[in-house]
Image (tube, rainbow, N blue to C red):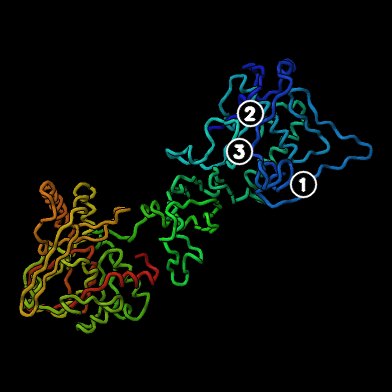
């Protein structure tokens, strides 16, 4: 990081240039001292920097009392000021004066107070800065060069708005605005430049090390971790906080860790978790959002190591954990995955060797249920072994994780190839990959299959991870993925068979994504039930067909097809929002039962067991 020189070119200062052969850190020669003005003006008021003086650190003197205009804030609890050593009887107080333009001399005995040494060091730095400015030096020095005098301890924020985030500017300023906290001066070797005697250098070095110890912290005490400023003030937080913020017209800009958040003031007021605004027992909002002033703005803002504090015009104080804000802000959500998954093709799934769960463990233990749900959430399919081959036992199995969703097919469906319903599934024909109930406004979330009997050949079940296929489309042709996720289509089911009369219509795009992070959460793919395409303008229709063809090609790749043979006693749970299923044509008598489950209830069960769902 570039170092900024201390007050170079201050008004009213003139100094003779140093010889190029003479180091900048060397003492001034008598000739150079004679060329200096009668007096070197002192440095400008330091505001936030004055708070670094030990007397101000502990609320001591050396300036206006805390709370009065121009006072530096007391950053640490008050403690008695350190007194100099007592002089012996008849001893005269040593003089600390100096010649015109010279830095103050530090007496060897008694040891001066830390505040006095700091002031002396500051004046010496001022004199050296003026001499360096007159010599043509304006920039900062590296830490290795003698005379380096300033170092910024604030965070470094690599963004386009770096200057607006209240970090020290590249070029020094003569004055800093009140309330601007810029922690500088990690070491003061420049204080040694004007010291001719080794004893003075030793004293200065001792106090400079003490000051650096206070700024950087040591094993015994660290810099205060709470930095306060008014709502209009500037702020630069210590590195330990990893935090910086700035108020804008209608929002707070806050960086914590690697996340830069922009938090609207109304949002910050609306989501207050105080007892008067939020019922912690019911986890519900108590605040009437309609009562919040849409032009609200905090009167004061304060940040410590883990918490943001906002004081509103009515005096109400809102507190937010910084980690909570990262998790719940828009910027934080963009980086998070709602539902962790493992995308797979046939080879990936076989190599994973995902185990089936025994029926007794599934029904009687939370461990067995949790293992089953973990597999289901990650892969979209899961198996339960050793289930009694009856519809009643299958119903008990399904109710272990969810409420059964009753549909036009009843509570538990039970079918053979007798075409008792107006659906291709009730035949012996092969079924291409598809998802069920695309003609519902909200397709059924989970489907359960249990083969009770099969006396014949064929009939294998086809499973394809739709999310894996969509991911391949996104990687190879992002424009196709975007089109499939934006164009809504109608799906329709018309039935007039026997006593069953139904006309269902569902509307939605083929791919459904969360808009904030583009995460896919639902695929609605069923070429059997897709209705007339009348929701797409003519200039989009052809492009939609190209996108649909690209997805279909991925879904039909042989390497993406997982074929399994369902047998009596082995129940299959399928995520109908993700995994497409199909069937091989078969011969003989084949009897299946199953049901649909409410997706919300399955995810609720998983969360209660500590899983992310």
Q: Is residue 333 left or right of residue 114?
A: left
Residue under label 1, please give it: 81
Residue 312: which disc?
none
Residue 581 found in image quarter = bottom left
* Labelled disc at residue 146: 2
**Regarding mark 2 in the picture, which secondary structure is present there?**
loop
Q: Nearer the viewer, residue 216 or 327?
A: 327
Q: CA distance from mark 1 to mark 2?
A: 32 Å
Q: Which mark is residue 184?
A: 3
Q: How far separated are the C-alphas under marks 2 and 3? A: 17 Å
Between discs 1 and 2, the one toward the N terminus: 1
Quarter in which the C terminus is drawn: bottom left
| Viewer can see residue 297 | yes
The tag earlier along the polypeptide, 3 or 1, is: 1
Q: Residue at x 7, y 76 (%)?
A: 417
Residue 21 position in % (x across, y down): 63, 17
């Amino acid at each position: 990081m570039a170092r900024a020189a201390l007050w170079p070119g201050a008004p009213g200062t003139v100094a003779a240039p140093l010889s190029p052969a003479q180091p900048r850190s060397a003492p001034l020669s008598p000739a150079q001292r004679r060329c200096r003005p009668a007096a070197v003006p002192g440095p400008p008021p330091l505001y936030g920097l004055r708070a670094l003086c030990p007397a101000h650190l502990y609320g001591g003197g050396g300036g206006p009392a805390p709370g009065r205009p121009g006072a530096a804030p007391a950053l640490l609890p008050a403690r008695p000021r350190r007194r100099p050593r007592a002089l012996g009887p008849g001893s005269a107080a040593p003089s600390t004066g100096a010649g015109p333009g010279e830095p103050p001399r530090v007496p060897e005995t008694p040891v001066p107070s830390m505040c006095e040494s700091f002031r002396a060091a500051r004046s010496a730095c001022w004199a050296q800065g003026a001499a360096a400015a007159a010599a043509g030096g304006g920039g900062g020095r590296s830490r290795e060069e003698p005379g380096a005098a300033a170092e910024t301890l604030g965070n470094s924020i690599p963004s386009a708005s770096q200057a607006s985030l209240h970090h020290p500017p590249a070029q020094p300023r003569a004055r800093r605005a009140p309330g601007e906290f810029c922690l500088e001066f990690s070491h003061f070797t420049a204080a040694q430049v004007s010291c001719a005697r080794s004893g003075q250098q030793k004293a200065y070095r001792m106090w400079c090390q003490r000051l650096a110890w206070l700024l950087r912290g040591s094993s015994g005490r660290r810099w205060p971790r709470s930095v306060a400023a008014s709502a209009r003030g500037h702020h630069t937080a210590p590195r330990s906080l990893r935090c910086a913020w700035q108020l804008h017209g209608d929002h707070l800009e806050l960086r914590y860790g690697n996340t830069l958040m922009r938090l609207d003031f109304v949002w910050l007021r609306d989501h207050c978790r105080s007892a008067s605004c939020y019922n912690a027992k019911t986890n519900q909002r108590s605040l009437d959002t309609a009562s919040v002033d849409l032009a609200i703005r905090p009167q004061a803002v304060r940040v410590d190591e883990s918490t943001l504090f906002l004081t509103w015009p009515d005096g109400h104080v809102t507190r937010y954990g910084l980690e909570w804000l990262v998790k719940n802000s828009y910027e934080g959500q963009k980086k998070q995955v709602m539902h962790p998954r493992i995308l797979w093709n046939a080879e990936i799934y076989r190599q994973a060797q995902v185990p089936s769960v025994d029926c007794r463990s599934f029904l009687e233990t939370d461990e067995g249920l949790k293992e089953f749900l973990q597999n289901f959430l990650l892969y979209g399919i899961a198996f339960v072994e050793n289930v009694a081959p009856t519809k009643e036992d299958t119903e008990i199995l399904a109710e272990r994780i969810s409420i059964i969703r009753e549909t036009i097919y009843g509570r538990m469906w039970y079918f053979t190839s007798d075409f008792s319903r107006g659906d291709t599934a009730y035949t012996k024909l092969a079924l291409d990959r598809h998802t069920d109930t695309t003609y519902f406004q909200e397709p059924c979330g989970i489907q359960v299959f249990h083969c009770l009997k099969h006396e014949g050949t064929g009939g294998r079940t086809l499973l394809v991870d739709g999310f894996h296929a969509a991911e391949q489309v996104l990687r190879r042709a992002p424009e196709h993925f975007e089109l499939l996720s934006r164009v809504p289509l109608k799906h329709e089911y018309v039935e007039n068979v026997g006593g069953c009369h139904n006309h269902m219509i569902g509307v939605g795009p083929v791919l459904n994504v969360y808009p904030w992070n583009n995460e896919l959460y639902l695929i609605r793919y069923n070429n059997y039930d897709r209705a007339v395409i009348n929701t797409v303008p003519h200039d989009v229709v052809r492009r939609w067909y190209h996108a649909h063809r690209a997805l279909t090609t991925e879904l039909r790749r042989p390497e993406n097809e997982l074929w399994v043979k369902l047998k009596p006693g082995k129940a299959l749970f399928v995520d109908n929002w993700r995994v497409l299923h199909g069937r091989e044509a078969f011969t003989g008598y084949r009897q299946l039962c199953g049901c649909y489950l409410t997706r919300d209830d399955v995810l609720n069960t998983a969360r209660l067991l500590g899983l992310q769902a």
